[in-house]
Image (tube, helix red, strand yellow):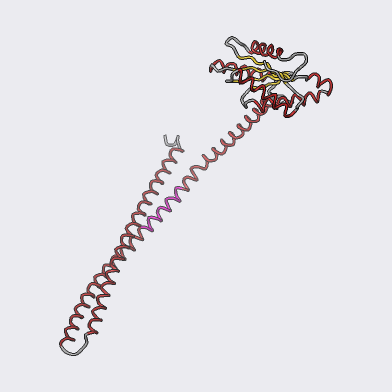
Amino acid sequence: MDDAHPGGRRADVDQSAADLDQQQADADQAASRADQMEADADQALADRDQRASDRDQAAADWERSRAPDGTLAEIAHEASRLERLAANRERDSIAAVRLRTTAQRGATADRRDEAAHERDLAATARDRAAQSGQQQAGSDRVAAASDRAAAATDREAAAVDRRSGSLDDLTGVLRRAAGELAIAHEIDRSRRTGRPMILAIVDVDALGLVNERQGHAAGDALLHDVARAITSTLRSYDVTARCGGGFVCALSDVTRATASAHAAEIQRALRTRRPEASVSVGLAELADDDTLSTLSTRAAVALRRTKPPALPAHRTA
């Protein structure tokens, strides 16, 4: 079973090495704490040694201050001698303890160094095992990542091609066929969610006259500016498609009043680019029995009611 799963075996070895590393780190930490405790004890003994030395010096000073001949001098000398003797005995005792403490600290330091060395060896061994065990897996991951990146690039390029093929070269909005498909999806979504949808047909007033009198390049420029006015006014997810000399838009989750306000805003946006230009807009709200065809027909009928022969400025029906 292990031979069939080399990755699992490598993981077990790596985990064992990590556990050993942790144990050795804990031993190193324990040795460090013991070393600190012994250092504190050594300092306490040094303080006691200093106090004993101070007592010895004080006794000597007292003896010198009472140095006259006679009994008093003998008494002072004997008292001082006894005091120095006691101080020396304490200093000898402290020195012996300090020697033992120093030896213990040395042993503790040796253990700490040994634990640190073993931890370093274990870490090195683990790194080598991980490196050798993961070389093939790492190579496989690199190859797989390269394949995924190439596939993602291909998908992105294909998506760009699809989007480019669906867009009108002149205006940048959807072509008619792609627009009809997108509007059909909006109709289905509106029915699923129970939310309203408005279909708007935007017709460019006097486009034929512009083409006739100024040329088709001027007419194309006018269409381009109308498309910009529409897309700058509507939301990014509203559907806009070119249909010949006009445009059709699907506005989801809006009322007829909101759609009329959008139509007026489109006219204002166009006037900032072309003060002489205007559009007419026909609106139709999706009904329960509507198809794309019947909805488009009702929007076209509404549009015709807004376009008298004199071609007045923007009107909405």
Q: For the stretch drawn in magenta, what is the main secondary structure?
A: helix
Q: In the displayed structure, does residue 66 sit left or right of residue 20? A: left
* Residue at the bottom extreme of this rendering: 69
- On the image, the x and y values in percent for residue 46 come to 30, 69
- On the image, the x and y values in percent for residue 68 come to 20, 89
**Of residues 31 and 280, which is closer to you in this image?**
280
Q: In the displayed structure, does residue 60 sit left or right of residue 170? A: left
Q: Is residue 64 above or below residue 311?
A: below
**Of residues 127 and 100, which is closer to you in this image?**
100
Q: How many marks?
A: 0
- On the image, the x and y values in percent for residue 221 come to 77, 26
Q: Residue 165's quadrant in the figure?
A: top right
Q: Is residue 48 above or below residue 109?
A: below
Q: Is residue 113 magenta?
A: yes
The residue under the point 80% across, 25% down is 218
* Residue at the right extreme of this rendering: 213
Q: Residue 66's quadrant in the figure?
A: bottom left
Q: Residue 12's quadrant in the figure?
A: top left
The residue under the point 20% across, 75% down is 86
- On the image, the x and y values in percent for residue 277 come to 76, 24
Q: In the displayed structure, does residue 97 sit left or right of residue 11? A: left
* Residue at the top extreme of this rendering: 289
Residues shaded magenta: 112-126
Q: Is residue 313 above or below residue 135?
A: above
